[in-house]
Image (spheres, helix red, strand yellow):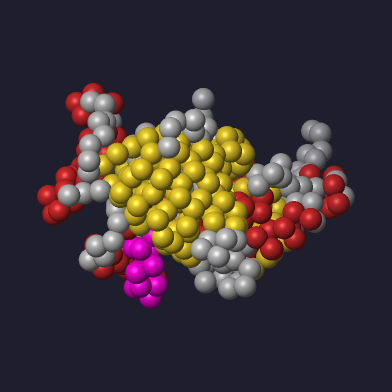
Amino acid sequence: MPEQLPEVSMNDVLPTSQLRRAAVIYNPVKVDIDALREAVNTEAAAAGWAESIWFETSVDDIGQGVTAEALARGVDLVIVAGGDGTVRAVVEAVRGRDVPVGLLPSGTGNLLARNLKMTLNDMPDSVRTAFAGEDRAIDLGMIRVERADGTRDEHAFVVMAGLGLDAKMITNTDEDLKKKAGWVAYVKALVASLRDPEELHLRFRLDDQPVKRATVHTLILGNCGSLPANILLMPEAVLDDGLFDVMMTRPGGAMGWIRVWVKIAWTNGIVRRTKAGRAIAGEHKNDKDLRYETGSVLTARLSRPEQIELDGDEFGHALAFKAWIEPGRLRVRVPIVPS
């Protein structure tokens, strides 16, 4: 009977310098670092990768700097463990580099992972996907913001950029309550924001269309449209269609707000999620309460500086901005779908 040969892994064949290596960018506030290290070490070894290198984010460096350092060391994969803000910062640094990003959902919303229909509450499974999944190319949103003093700064976003009520809600959110109750904290913030009577007055141009004027309560650019609690804010938004969706709301009084909520929470969130439901609901029609458009470049100037948020984080006040989509610019590791 022939002698049984021992199993041989790639780690036994290749020198460490030739093995693929991942960098883990993690927010220490959001993760259980011991459990995370154990899961990463286990899956890296199983996949035949070298030992991962670790980078912790901080208040002064929420992700861009440490990600740039990881990329300078020639890593083959960037794994991000944190909330939407950490993901946004890491993606901003990865932009333009041919390196995929693995997502380990660790925050309250986890909106990118949610829209990619990834597992949200199973860390070992998410780590396994990062090492053994497949790459999906998705669009990346970019925005150049002009401040009141004339300075400009440029940022990436993977989920949404918002002004008006949307941005004020982020500002009014109680961070302590958010940590304890998750998205319930936004309800309190929304109520506080609804008391603000101010509207946005802007001139804007979408792609090559004529310049238009608008007065709205909320302006949102969405690269994807699904939120927690089964809310489908932008029913036509797709992560890889080369477009962003623009949503503008201006409800007229209490009944107007009710109509908007019914359209978003019921029609979009429930009815339009099935093929039969979409047939019943029919094509969405814009009205004075709620309006959608799609495009790849949006330029806007406001009558006064307004609060702006990117992927759920405050980004100060904008007097004007130019936003555009970069098709297929980001590669994200997703589970392999059986054929």
Q: Does residue 132 belong to the magenta stretch?
A: no
User: How far across and how far down the image is residue 6, in percent?
Assistant: 78, 44
Residue drawn at x 79%, y 33% is 1
User: Is residue 59 placed above or below 104 in the rendered structure?
Assistant: below
Tag count: 0
| Above or below, 21 relative to 38 | above
Residue nearest the observer in this picture, 256 or 210 = 210
177 falls in the magenta region? yes
Where residue 21 sits in the image (x, y, percent)?
75, 51
Q: Residue at the location (69% across, 63% down)?
A: 66
- Is residue 281 toward the left or the right of residue 103 in the image? left
Give the residues drawn in magenta, as a range: 167-178
Residue 304 visible to an observer of this rendering: yes
Q: Main secondary structure of the magenta part?
A: helix
**Quarter of the image where one finds residue 286:** top left
* Left or right: 55, with 278 as reference point: right
Q: Does 68 appear above or below 239?
A: below
For the residue pair 163 and 199, the one nearer the viewer reads as 199
Q: Residue furthest left?
A: 255
The residue at the point 49 percent across, 53 percent down is: 320
Left or right position of 241 against 162: right
Q: Quadrant of residue 104?
A: bottom right
Q: Position of residue 287 (x, y in %)?
A: 23, 37
Residue 52 visible in the current orientation: no
Q: Is residue 182 left or right of residue 59?
A: left
User: Quarter of the image holding residue 23?
Assistant: bottom right
